[in-house]
Amino acid sequence: MLPFTNLTGNPQDEYFGDGLAEEITNVLAQIGRLKVIARTSAFAFKGRNEDVRKIAETLGVNHVLEGSIRRLGMRTRVTAQLIRSSDGTHISSKRYDCEHTDLFALQDEISADIAQRFHVRLKAHKPASHSPGAYEAFLEGRFHWHKFTPAGFERALACYQRAISLDPANGSAFTGMAEAYITMVIDAGASAYELFPKAAEAARIALHLDHRDSGAHAAIGLLAAMRDYDWKAAGKHFRRALELAANTHARVAYVYWYLLPRGEFREALLQCDRVIAEDPLLLLGRTAKATALLWARSYPGGIQCCQDALELDSRFTKAWQVKTYLLGLLSRHQEAIACAHGAIEILGPSHLGLFTLGLAHAAAGNRADAGQFLAQIEALPRGHVGSPAAIAAMYMLLNDVESSVRWMAKAIEQQDPGAMWMQFHPWADSVHSDPRYQALAGLMHLNTAA
């Protein structure tokens, strides 16, 4: 399912074609007999004007649905073509016209036509909203959230708030808010103390409105792991999220924030392989596998996963970062430092950029250089994403157990999501036997065995 081409001529309407295509993808993905490629991979071809057969080959599918959307006054026209990838034949082509008040019916009609074409039945699903204005606001919020930038998160929250003001029973908008708050902490350096309670309340309301909301279960699972260290609840909600929907982002979160902290490396790798199969161009799926291989001490395989991601996008900073760590663990220190410079050229003097380069120097035993980066990281604002745990990791590599334990305590106090990662990480080998570290691991309710 490729994003619909916007023929309206107004860039402000871009969100609508993207959002409608994503919602149809989500509906079709619930049909067990259909292999439906997830949003990230399908949307990687947006605006590239590539041959449909090549797209299908890259994604590993037999059919491609593409189309266009045009909005005229209070009416919307969608044209959709189902194409067989083997020879480029148009199996079907249909035009859909509706009033703005019937947008959800439009989505359902397109989904039903595709399901009928493949002789499968749609599962019953709850509409995001019965209010056309709220539905559009929700779609616009998803559009901005997918940018994964601080400004994008803020605009997404404003859209979700507008959706809720138009329809207070719009559970999808509450789920979107929970996701935005959590990703602002993980990816944009926002304060966990400030935003985790807001995320928890939004997810609670979403689940109250629809107990089958996969995204709400995933959000509660994330909070149970990162904030409460309640692994039983986290596992329960992550597994429920994955039962309810083929959600590759939830599956990646399950790997990063549940399986790896608990040392369940084999299951983590199986889940990563499933992500790559369902969403082959989701770069985070490949770096999640690289991270799992790092924790499982299979460093060369992890480096190959990073290379695969970088071949798809040379500016994907996560791959540069994880590759740096892997090279350092293999004692290929000059390569690691060069790789870290690749990350910092993209990230600039941010926490993640400084940490990546500082850690490469720490792994190489360059205490003076590592110390300079430590000083810069320590000067970053309180609550910045990963700062206490990152500093603890660097001290671990410098064999300064006293300082690493002290910073780990701060990481737990500040609800730093990175704190739980130190339990089974190779960096932490030097501190695992220290009783103070074991006590901190106990606070996170993690097995203290290395």
Image (cartoon, rainbow, N blue to C red):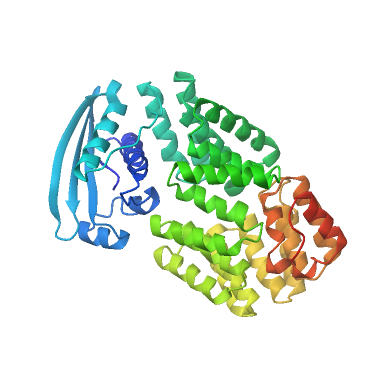
> In the rendering, at what x and y percent does residue 129 appear?
40, 25
> In the rendering, at what x and y percent does residue 105 appear?
28, 27
Q: Where, by quadrant of the figure, is residue 267 drawn?
A: bottom right
Q: How many marks?
A: 0
Asked whether, in this view, residue 108 is left or right of residue 191, the answer is left
Task: Identify the residue at horizontal 62%, vertical 52% (top origin).
Answer: 258
Camera-side residue of 253 and 126 = 126
Q: Is residue 132 above or below residue 87?
A: above
Task: Identify the residue at horizontal 60%, vertical 35% (top origin).
Answer: 199
Q: Where, by quadrant of the figure, is residue 116 drawn?
A: top left
Task: Identify the residue at horizontal 72%, vertical 45% (top origin).
Answer: 415
Say if residue 184 shows up in the picture: no
> In the rendering, at what x and y percent does residue 32 appear?
35, 47
Task: Identify the residue at horizontal 58%, vertical 74% (top origin).
Answer: 299
> In the rendering, at what x and y percent does residue 262 appear?
66, 57
Camera-side residue of 403 and 422 = 422
Asked whether, in this view, residue 336 is left or right of residue 446, the answer is left
Q: Is residue 324 above or below residue 129?
A: below
Q: Quadrant of the C terminus?
A: bottom right
Say if residue 441 shows up in the picture: yes
Asked whether, in this view, residue 384 is left or right of residue 147, the answer is right
Camera-side residue of 111 and 402 = 111
